């Protein structure tokens, strides 16, 4: 037998063993015989983009500001022209070269310093080397993600393909399954998806020794979750480094393929067919351990048992249902307890088709969460509540966690690592409609840690986001004591210092008048070789900065103070915040609203509306420091900038050597409207702010195709 065939045989033996181990007692259960799979299978959809059988509209070709890309081209031209006019092109080029050299000299996993290449992503590397074109890429990336999330057919496959590419897993061809024609075909698709996910999961672990798998299973949650209450590092840093190396040894592409195998189940056309399951045509109602209420069917598959619940009120203790691989509930106001996904049960799918449901859990890896596994939770309708602790609500540690809620006014409440958070995999939470509430205290709402891609996308509704309010911030020190709480959320790509580089974190919101509360290092930012994105496509939004109350709802005991937020990069990182429309408010305290610190890049770009930039503390509103590029760009509207620091750039640097690192570069660029500046800059003026790297530029609005970056004679603002 050839070595290739031998490896294939071993892979299938391992797959079978894990499938049986993950479904104890499944073969002994009284079950409905498995129906044959339909011949049609999951084939490419010939219908193209003509709408859906369930009435789901085809997503629009464009979302947000249609001229966002050329508007960002204007910004780049403005910056390049500014460097040229002040004869500092060579200084900015040195900044780019210096950042690239830092990346080149720290590429190894062990370098003898904090800065190393462990778990470094190539897209992050590329963006930091190209800081002037990075906003154009970030705009396209967030737009395409949101368009995919809006697609009720194959959009999840597109998101997973995008995640795979950005996580250095190669190019992917998104699946395009044909819609099932009946309830039986839909059930067959569920069976096929479970089997495909289980096999791919086994392939993902095949490169590891048994002791490595045991190590991951025992320690992932402890090291990266339960024993930590600070955002920037771990209690057990050496253990964290070891676990990251084991995650790198897994077949991460196969793990993503396991999630891709489940992606067809998120198709609204398939969910519509599952709703047609005929209760009257089913066998006599059955008893299932761990379930209260009517159970219509039990179907055994090689990947575990599929249970179908009736349209009445049911209660499911998912961890007490042996052998469960998929639960489909047809309706009723149901209650779900736990539902952990781990090595013991590596794949779980929960689909609820109707009702105001309650999901409750205290263990790690529930509600579309996974610890070394692959989990999916789909809720098709109703005003639902999700309560969990850690690694939950579309989040994962080494695997994939997916939660999609299709309708209703929903509430998401958790403690840590929840609501679209990933380390060593993919975490996705999509809420398609309704006025929703999101709340958690740490690592939440679109966070990517090492080798992680975390996404929270809420497509519509007046939503409220809360991140922080519980753990005292970890930046308290004798030199720079500041009050406040940890946040680390809302589109945050966060590395774990002295452990590993950061991943990719994204928060997107499609429309509605939204409110964002967030504490330290939150909202469109990167930390320690990570990259984060926040984008709101419509509505009059309020970004409050520090959380108004404690996490438990009691009056806040810490002084209102927020540090690093709203389009920021901190320690070799990048952050991007885009807002497409509406009269918006941006708040914080220090080091935010387009801020970069320590060889980093931060952009805040608002494309329309009468906006207010309220932060009055230092290093806010377009500021670069310690060899940073910080940019605030407002394209249109009558805007108000409070405080004095707009576009200020210090001429001094203590973290890096001058002139080698280039310097600090700060931009506030405002097009259109009658604007008010706390530094008393005039409308239609061109100002130097502190050093030659500081710019405050106010221009009348013109169409992007007609706009030029030719500067009028500089008119210094008062105090420049």
Image (cartoon, rainbow, N blue to C red):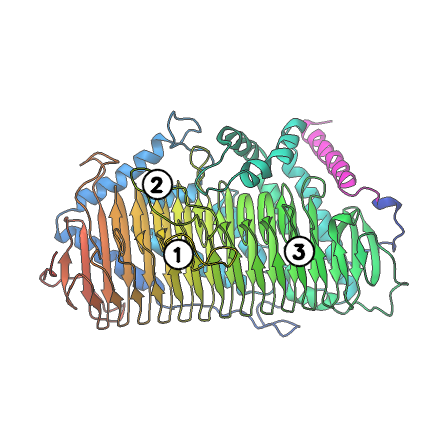
Magenta segment, which residues?
1-25
| Magenta stretch prevailing secondary structure | helix
Mark 3 or mark 1: name the one nearer the start of the chain: 3
Q: Which image quadrant: the N terminus?
A: top right
Q: CA distance from mark 3 to mark 2?
A: 39 Å
In x, y percent, where is residue 365? 63, 47
Question: Residue beneath label 3, please?
Answer: 360
Question: Residue beneath label 2, please?
Answer: 572
- Identify the residue shown where x is 22% and y is 45%: 664
Callout 3 touching callout 2 (CB < 8 Å): no
Q: Which image quadrant: the C terminus?
A: bottom left
Q: Nearer the viewer, residue 692 or 482?
A: 482
Q: CA distance from mark 3 to mark 1?
A: 28 Å
Q: Nearer the viewer, residue 337 or 330?
A: 337
Question: Residue beneath label 1, please?
Answer: 546
Q: Secondary structure at mark 3?
A: strand
- Identify the residue shown where x is 56% and y is 65%: 151
Mark 3 or mark 2: name the one nearer the start of the chain: 3
The answer to whether residue 251 of the structure is visible from this angle is no
């Amino acid at each position: 037998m050839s070595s290739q065939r031998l490896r294939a045989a071993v892979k299938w033996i391992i797959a079978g063993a894990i499938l049986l181990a993950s479904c104890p007692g499944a073969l002994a259960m009284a079950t409905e015989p498995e129906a044959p799979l339909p011949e049609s299978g999951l084939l490419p959809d010939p219908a193209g983009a003509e709408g859906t059988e369930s009435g789901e509209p085809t997503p629009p070709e464009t979302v947000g500001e249609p001229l966002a890309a050329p508007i960002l081209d204007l910004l780049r031209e403005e910056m390049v022209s500014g460097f040229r006019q002040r004869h500092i092109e060579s200084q900015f080029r040195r900044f780019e070269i210096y950042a690239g050299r830092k990346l080149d000299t720290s590429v190894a996993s062990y370098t003898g310093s904090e800065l190393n290449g462990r778990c470094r992503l190539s897209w992050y590397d590329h963006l930091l080397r190209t800081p002037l074109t990075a906003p154009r890429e970030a705009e396209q990336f967030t737009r395409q993600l949101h368009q995919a999330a809006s697609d009720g057919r194959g959009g999840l496959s597109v998101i997973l393909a995008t995640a795979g590419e950005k996580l250095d897993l190669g190019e992917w061809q998104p699946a395009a399954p044909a819609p099932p024609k009946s309830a039986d075909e839909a059930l067959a698709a569920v069976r096929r998806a479970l089997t495909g996910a289980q096999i791919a999961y086994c392939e993902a672990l095949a490169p590891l020794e048994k002791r490595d798998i045991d190590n991951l299973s025992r320690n992932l949650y402890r090291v990266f979750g339960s024993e930590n209450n600070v955002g920037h590092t771990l209690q057990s840093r050496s253990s964290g480094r070891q676990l990251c190396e084991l995650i790198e040894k897994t077949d991460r592409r196969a793990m993503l393929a396991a999630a891709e195998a489940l992606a067809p189940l998120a198709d609204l056309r398939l969910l519509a067919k599952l709703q047609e399951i005929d209760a009257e045509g089913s066998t006599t109602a059955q008893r299932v351990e761990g379930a209260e209420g009517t159970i219509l069917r039990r179907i055994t598959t090689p990947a575990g048992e599929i249970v179908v619940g009736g349209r009445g009120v049911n209660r499911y203790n998912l961890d007490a249902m042996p052998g469960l691989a998929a639960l489909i509930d047809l309706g009723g106001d149901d209650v779900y307890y736990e539902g952990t996904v781990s090595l013991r049960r590596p794949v779980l799918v929960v689909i609820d088709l109707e009702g105001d449901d309650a999901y409750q859990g205290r263990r790690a890896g529930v509600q579309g969460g996974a610890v070394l596994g692959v989990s999916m939770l789909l809720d098709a309708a109703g005003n639902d509540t999700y309560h969990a602790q850690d690694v939950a609500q579309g989040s994962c540690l080494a695997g994939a966690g997916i939660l999609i809620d299709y309708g209703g006014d929903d509430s998401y409440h958790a403690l840590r690592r929840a609501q679209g958070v990933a380390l060593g995999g993919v975490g996705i939470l999509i809420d398609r409609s309704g006025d929703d509430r999101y709340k958690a205290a740490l690592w939440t709402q679109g966070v990517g840690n090492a080798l992680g891609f975390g996404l929270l996308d809420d497509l519509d509704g007046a939503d409220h986001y809360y991140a922080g309010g519980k753990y005292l911030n970890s930046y308290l020190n004798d030199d720079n004591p500041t009050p406040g709480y940890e946040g680390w959320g809302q589109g945050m790509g966060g590395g774990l210092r002295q452990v590993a580089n950061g991943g990719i974190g994204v928060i997107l919101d499609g429309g509605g008048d939204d409110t964002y509360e967030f504490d330290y290092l939150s909202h469109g930012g990167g930390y320690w070789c990570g990259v984060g994105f926040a984008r709101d496509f419509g509505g009059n939004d309020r970004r409050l900065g520090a959380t108004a109350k404690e996490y438990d709802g009691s009056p806040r005991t810490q002084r209102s103070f927020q540090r690093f937020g709203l389009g920021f990069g901190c320690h070799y990182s990048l952050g991007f915040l885009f807002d497409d429309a509406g009269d918006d408010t941006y708040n914080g305290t220090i080091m935010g609203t387009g801020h970069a610190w320590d060889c980093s890049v931060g952009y805040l770009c608002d494309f329309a509306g009468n906006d207010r930039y309220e932060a009055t503390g230092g290093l806010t509103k377009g500021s670069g420091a310690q060899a940073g590029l910080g940019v605030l760009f407002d394209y249109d509207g009558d805007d108000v900038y409070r405080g004095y620091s707009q576009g200020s750039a210090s001429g001094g640097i203590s973290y890096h050597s001058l002139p080698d690192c280039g310097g600090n570069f700060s931009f506030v660029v405002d097009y259109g409207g009658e604007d008010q500046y706390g530094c008393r800059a005039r409308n239609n003026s061109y100002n130097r702010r502190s050093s030659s790297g500081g710019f405050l530029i106010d221009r009348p609005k013109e169409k992007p195709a007609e706009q030029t970056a030719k500067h009028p004679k500089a008119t210094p603002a008062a105090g420049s």
